[in-house]
Amino acid sequence: MHTVNQELNVPPHDLEAEKALLGCVLLNPRVLDDLDGLRPADFYWQRHGKLFEHLVAMCEGRKAIDSLLLVEQLKAHGDLEAVGGVAYIAELMGCVPYAHHAAYYARIVREKAKKRGLVELGHTACRMAYDDGTSVEQAIDATENALLRLGSDATEHKPFSAAEAAAEARRVLEEARYRDGTLGLPTGLATYDAYYGGLFAGELIVVAARTSIGKTSLALQIATHNAMAGRLVYFASCEMAASELLLRSACSLAGIPLQAVRSGRASDAEHDRVEEALRQLSGSALVIDDRPELSVATIRRETRRLVRKGLRLVVVDYLQIITPPDRKLQRYEQIGDMTRQLKSLARDLGVPVLVLAQLSRAAEAAEEPKLSHLRESGSIEQDADVVLLLHRPEEGIEADGDAWAADMIVGKNRNGPVGRLRLDWDAAVMQFRVHLSTF
């Protein structure tokens, strides 16, 4: 039968399972409670989808259901003949002796519907491939997104009861009580980790600053701190090559100025120290993706593969130079689409997603950066769970006789307090450290 269907190009379906499912509902309407998520469009035969639609409408309208009442419902909406008339409804009643197997038949109907979706997805991908007006990247992104939606089963995720939610909250509470250190993923900035808890799974954390302030250095510092501890980190670098990032990180780890190495002024002993740092980094759990045009779809594809290997952190450097999914949209719409996708990625993967972002030129004239200085700020501010604003004036910052190099302003924190940390900047090795009098 499968061979015949393939030769005739008949989409995957099982009419007997569809009839049996409808028969189960007519025998015992309560089974509809077990079919949450099944849609009329999941039925191959249109008349079956129409019948299921009316049965669900009767159930939601708190109407009694049997074959006679269904006939009256269909008559009232002029659909009786379209579904085969009274004779076909009677036939459905005789399809199954018991209603107990409704969920089993529903699984068959869903599976066939997904296979038909896969076939249609293939046709759509072919049409886009032949369309000269669609770029290869757009076609791949659209196909991957559609495949992810097809592969995720929304019917498997149901609302939590208060008891179920409380059990999960209790697990987190116990972990927080007995864990040695921060509950979230550590940043390596001890004061931030102790006060704010680190970087939390499922959250979108945005680090924003003007150019040459140290965004990449801070992100790389956080990434290598975790990767050296054996936590798998994916670093999407839209601006620097992987070898550049690793050399910079090795110099920081060895305490040797990068400029000394690049200018040839480093001694043999210093070169040896950098080489040893590179050896340590090569054994770390750091994955760097430095392809020229990185899109959110590419990042999603790579991180979904890594999550099976224990992915713990995603870093994106940086938001405004990620390749947008649709180049025809206005810039603010492109940014909004990407931040929503990155927030969704954090939730789907269950890991923190740390994204670097550029501040507008208005921040240069201001005394210190604000959320409103985020370029295309509306969507970034809305989707981010945490926004960290780096502020590092050339002359440093002074107060009460104390001096430090930079402020890390916690401008938004959806699940905690806002505030700021004082940071020192070691320009030679390009690293931030918490200032002693940070609070």
Image: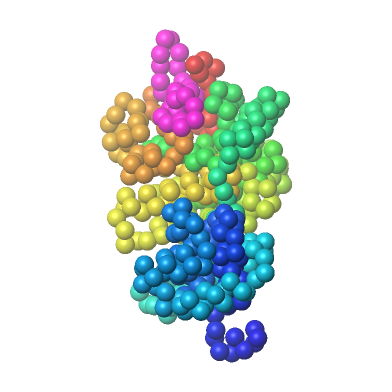
- Residue 410 located within the stretch drawn in magenta: yes
- Is residue 326 visible in the rendered structure shown here? yes
The coloring applied to the image is rainbow
In the image, what residue occupies the spot 42% across and 31% down? 412
Q: Could you tell me residue 126's position as x and y percent?
A: 47, 78
Residue 410: image quadrant is: top left
Pick the front one: 313 or 40? 40
Which region of the structure is painted magenta? Answer: 396-424
In the image, what residue occupies the spot 52% across and 50% down? 345
Q: Is residue 121 left or right of residue 337?
A: right
Residue 339's place in the image compared with 6, above or below, is above
- Residue 11 located within the stretch drawn in magenta: no
In the image, what residue occupies the spot 42% across and 57% down? 323
Q: Could you tell me residue 101's position as x and y percent?
A: 67, 64
In the image, what residue occupies the spot 41% across and 60% down? 325
Residue 173's place in the image compared with 235, above or below, is above
- Residue found farthest to the front: 68
Residue 148: image quadrant is: bottom right
Q: Could you tell me residue 36's position as x and y percent?
A: 55, 56
Pick the front one: 134 or 315? 134
Pick the front one: 432 or 156? 156
Magenta segment, prevailing SS (helix, strand or loop): strand
Quarter placement of the N terminus? bottom right
Pick the front one: 245 or 1? 1
Q: Is residue 379 left or right of residue 314?
A: left
Residue 364's place in the image compared with 9, above or below, is above
Total residue callouts = 0
- Is residue 118 visible in the rendered structure shown here? no
Residue 371: image quadrant is: top left
Q: Could you tell me residue 277's position as x and y percent?
A: 68, 41
